[in-house]
Image (spheres, rainbow, N blue to C red):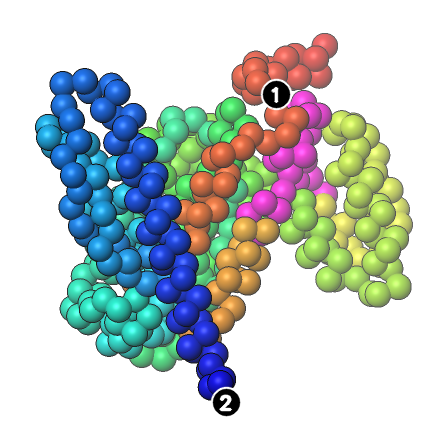
Amino acid sequence: MKKQLTREEIVELVYEELKAKIKELLERLMKEERELYLKEEKDTKGNGYYERSLLTKFGEIEGLRVPRTRDGGFYPALLPGKTRSWFDLGEMVMYMFLSGISTRKVSKFLEKIYQVYYSPTSISRLCEVAEEEIEKWRGRVLERSYLALYIDCFFLPVRRGRVKKEPIYVVIGLREGGKREVIGFWVMGGEGESSYVWEEILREIRDRGVEEVEMVVADGLSGIEEAIRRVFPGARYQYCIVHATRNSMKKVRKEDKEELAQVLKGIYRAENREEARDELRELEARFGRKYPKVVKFWKEKFDVLLTFMDYPEWLRRYIYTTNWLERLIKELRRRLKIMESLPGERSVEKILYLLLREENEKYLSRTLPGFKKYSWKEESSLQNQTQII
């Protein structure tokens, strides 16, 4: 009777078959690559092969025949240079390490699955190299000018002896050409969001080369407007409409929510400030006695809530809320959900770096739909002149 294979044995057989096919394909492609090289470099010839091993996601391929030339100038572009890995081993190790797996267990995993041995010390060294990359990325020189900076923070459970939720500060920038960029993230300790911390962060952003910011979009944190002014005196402040509306809705009874939502929508969807003021008077007429604090808030914050109205219509939808940043934070929460707590500040920084670097690459690869190619400064100036006339 034929012995039934276990799941592990089946997986091992499949991996062996895949490695054989990958080896065959790589050797054929490298040989063809050498032929192209020899057509361009007519003064040299092929010089046989040498063997090397290559670590892949399916395990280690041994005896890979790499073609060479007499001049020693050929090296297949398909293969990694100095490393033996055909994938980012450091990043994979970091993900495992940050998931709470000890360096010893990571070492055992690599040995069992990929048949290669990395000592616990080597695993730690891989992570240390990544820390240098993190600092380089977080300290990189930024654009000179940004149309908008979107700032917000969220909370993660961090272990510093005891586990407590700490604020993680995140900033996205909108470039003049219509591309978004993750400016950075900051793990500052503490237990609550602080405008003083935001001022320190904005100063750091300025020190990284940002000379001009047209506006900063943020929630209504106490002292945030003053902090922005001290660092970027020319920047305007846009109080996030979504935050303001959401906070107002929390302060009314259930039966009044729908009516209030419609009146507030009339304010921030008006075509200009004059129409918005008419809607503000409507808000006071309907809810002034019933919810005086809500009405008072919209009257006092009217100007900073409608900063976006001083810009052309095509631009307004990009600058009236921090929704982009909230969506990014939601994605971070989703991907960090598997971790009950992060083991210290360094681990928080590493995992956030990996996730935010990935998101930043997506941002910089595409321009926002409908974003105009000409200068927003010229457009804003024309808009203001039209309003004055």
Q: Secondary structure at mark 1?
A: loop
Looking at the image, residue 89 lies above or below residue 306: below
In this rendering, which labeled residue sits more in front, label 1 or label 2?
Answer: 2
Q: Residue at x 59, y 38 (%)?
A: 238
Looking at the image, residue 58 lies above or below residue 72: below
Q: Within the magenta stretch, is there residue 123?
A: no
- Looking at the rendering, the stretch of residues picked out in magenta corresponds to 299-326
Q: Nearer the viewer, residue 233 or 271?
A: 271
Q: Amino acid at mark 1?
A: Lys
Residue 129 position by quadrant? bottom left
Res. 372 mark: 1
Residue 350 shows in the view: no
Quarter holding the C terminus is top right
Q: Secondary structure at mark 2?
A: loop
Q: Amino acid at mark 2?
A: Met
Res. 1 mark: 2
Q: Residue at x 72, y 51 (%)?
A: 245
Q: Is residue 182 left or right of residue 302?
A: left
Residue 250 position by quadrant? bottom right
Estimate the x, y position of residue 315 in percent, counting from the top left: 64, 27
Q: Nearer the viewer, residue 242 or 119?
A: 119
Estimate the x, y position of residue 285 in percent, counting from the top left: 88, 46
Estimate the x, y position of residue 364 in percent, counting from the top left: 47, 35
Q: Is residue 252 left or right of residue 247?
A: right
Q: Main secondary structure of the magenta part?
A: helix
Q: Are marks 1 and 2 in contact (CB under 8 Å)?
A: no
Q: Residue at x 50, y 89 (%)?
A: 1
**Farthest front residue?**
1
